[in-house]
Amino acid sequence: MLYLDNSATTKIHPEVLEAMMPYLQEEYGNPSSKFYSLAENAKKAVAKAREQVATLLGCDPDEVVFTSGATESNNMIIKGIADYYGREAGANNRLLTTKVEHPSVIETFNFLGERGYNVSFLDVDQYARVGVEQVKEAAAKMQPLLTSIMWGNNEIGSLNPIEELAKVFEENRQFFHTDATQVIGKVPVDMSKMPGLRFLSMSGHKIGGPKGVGAAIIRKQSKEIYTRLTPLMHGGGQENNYRSGTLAVHNIVGLGKAAEVAETNLENNVQRLKELENYLTDIFKKNLTGKVKFNSDEQDKIPGLISLQFIGVNNELLIKKLSAYIALSSGSACSSSKPSHVLNAAGKSLEEVRQTIRITLDSKIDESDLKVFDKIK
């Protein structure tokens, strides 16, 4: 099968699996235990993974909080900040986001809105992107406690100007969070150059790591002072009291190794994805002129992600028909039962939504694998 749904999940990297195996077998210690070798070895493995993730993202190791994935990270950061700073009567409980966020952000904002928080959703352009001036105006007018804007859209692939937005929130001294799940390993990320970006979410299984592990990056207020938020899970106080629970050492080791591989291969990965994307879009333009329409922008986008419409063809029927040979999707794997809120917010009609498919490439694919699309007329 030709797997073209890499925005949903990726195949685990061989080096990642190799790194994980000892911690599923002989190195089974709990890093919260003390003194004996199994515990100390586990603790060292977690510390190494924390450094690997920090290197990839340009933050301090003690700003890396391991979670079960970006959905938990998003919930943890948004609910945690809202509760800690905005729950008291008269406190700033204003929250700002966009209409095209991942469901784990949209539904968290809806949840908080139902509980009395003042929640606002920004409109987006035809590529599901926000503008700097648009956000700057909204932030100045609303003075939000927290703003959450995704780095790269998981359905259309458009990149938001996160570095410029981070400057806006740094100047306004407001909390800023981004869900960077889709851009890690495909876009350079250096949080050390963006002090206004206080929080970031990511998942391991989007970068060749295992499922069930991710990270929440919670930047410190200063070198000595940690940012306070209400934990999503209380208990033994692991992860600097941010996230209690026994650490999944094997998954954390896998995430660390995946981060190391992503950092090492970033430039080559990006270049290869762009080459494959150009090769495939040329096939569509050559063979299906007038029969396909691209939703994705041609610039400022995630490399290797193509959103396009097969005009007059129902996407679900097409995906089902090709499912024995090609793995495709109609959009986000996290909201597959609903019409795309992203495409709707970007101004697409219901008909256009229902004829849209998403193709997400892997740098290890060969051009010969994509020649199957040459047969579509």
Image (cartoon, grey):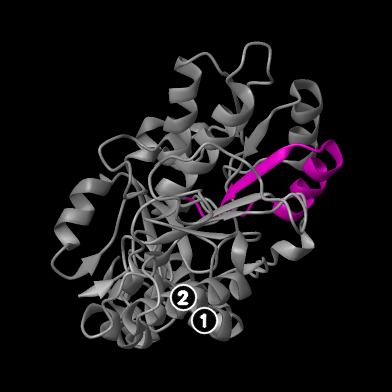
**Numbered mark located on residue 260 in the image:** 1
Mark linked to residue 256: 2
Q: At label 1, which amino acid type do we have?
A: Glu
Q: Is residue 160 magenta?
A: yes
Using the image, determine if residue 23 lies above or below residue 281.
below
State which quarter of the image contains the N terminus: bottom left
Within the magenta stretch, is there residue 246? no
Q: Nearer the viewer, residue 105 or 351?
A: 105
Could you tell me residue 10's position as x and y percent? 34, 70
- Say the numbered circle drawn on residue 56: none
Q: Which image quadrant is residue 355 in? A: top left
Residue lying farthest right? 171
- Numbered range of the magenta stretch: 156-179
What amino acid does circle 2 point to? Gly
Q: State the SS at label 1.
A: helix
- Residue 195's x, y, as percent? 77, 54
Residue at image x 59%, y 40%?
126
Q: Are marks 2 and 1 in contact (CB under 8 Å)?
A: yes
Q: For residue 289, say whether it is visible.
A: no
Question: Where residue 312 appears, x then y in whole percent?
Answer: 31, 44
Viewer-side residue, 171 vs 231 = 231
Residue at coordinates 51% horizontally, 79% vertically from top-left? 48
Q: Is residue 372 visible?
A: yes
Instruction: Choose between 70 and 343: the one closer to the eye.
Output: 70
Q: Quadrant of residue 118?
A: top right
Distance from Cα at disc 2 to Cα at disc 1: 6 Å
